Amino acid sequence: MTTGTGFLRHVIACNRAEPGDYLPFAIDGDMVGRVRRDIARRLAEFPDLFAVSVREVALHPDFTDFEARSRALDRAIGRLVEIGLVPKRRNELYPVAARFTDPPKAQLDRGGVAIFGVRAYGVHVNGYVRKPDGLHLWIGLRAKDKLVAPGKLDNLVAGGQPIGLSLTDNLIKECAEEADLPAALARQAHGVAAITYAMAVPEGLRADTLFVYDLALDPGFVPRNTDGELERFDLIKVEAVAERIRATDDFKFNVNLVIIDFLIRRGVIAPDHPEYLELVSGLHRDHPTAWR
């Protein structure tokens, strides 16, 4: 949990993870994630699924193709739900791979991604409006029944990157579901950044990359949520958004990072800001699979 004020504290909060607390998670000899040591001890209770040593956690080598590995991980998630290490299945499948462009070695229910410290990806859209008095951002309020960060503030559009969809197709899908944006309008979003962080969480490790898009919207457009994940949208002047991020913890933890990146690129956080260099470097850190 963040405390105090300032922008940098949000970046620090999303990068609190000690490499020594985790073991590599390997599939077919390739490291695809990181498993916390206490969780590794629990996975050792499933020798039919995992080979656990003092150096790594590996999916059992008997699983030699995508389908077999995916079935094995699905069985593991079922057992982890039963013993309470995974809260529940999310029924959304993510790819398991060392790098974004690699063919996935398996697919994994979203609910178990942090358990294995697998790299997860998402798309976030800064929806902005130019008015005579300056830039404004559309800010969403997350539903109070959300599993993660209920009741927190959010981007106009944000969603995880499931297996089997291109980034563009996922962007269009999320824009339609979260803000009722037509596909033609969603395609006008410009990819501007990729933000990375590695965050220790109770269930393991969030090792995320967020693909960030900016989308200029007409002052007359009003977003409308269609999937129940957001309660409402507010159009807020960018300086007011900046101050709320600087002084409060009202935003979902990783949304702080996305908007800080926007503030840097738009000159709201300028190079003479005392946190500027640490913010710029902190938004683009190595993934845990690069830890040695």
Image: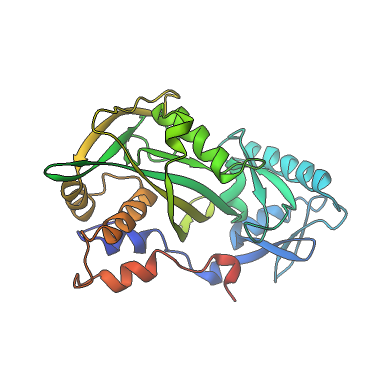
Residue nearest the viewer, comparing 148 with 186: 186
x 61%, y 44%: residue: 166
Depicted 235 relative to depicted 255: above or below: above
Depicted 292 relative to depicted 4: above or below: below
Residue 290: % across, % down: 58, 71
x 25%, y 28%: residue: 220
Outermost residue to the bottom: 292
**Total marks placed:** 0
Residue 202 lies left or right of residue 249; in this view the side is right
Residue nearest the viewer, comparing 59 with 264: 264
Residue 102: % across, % down: 69, 58
Q: How is the image coloured?
A: rainbow
Residue 201: % across, % down: 47, 53
x 38%, y 25%: residue: 225
Residue 120: % across, % down: 56, 51
Quarter containing the C terminus? bottom right
Depicted 40 relative to depicted 132: above or below: below
x 12%, y 42%: residue: 132
Residue 139 lies left or right of residue 86; in this view the side is left
Residue 283 lies left or right of residue 69; in this view the side is left
Residue nearest the viewer, comparing 219 with 269: 219
| Quadrant of residue 78 within the rendered picture | top right
Outermost residue to the left: 133
Quarter containing the N terminus? bottom left
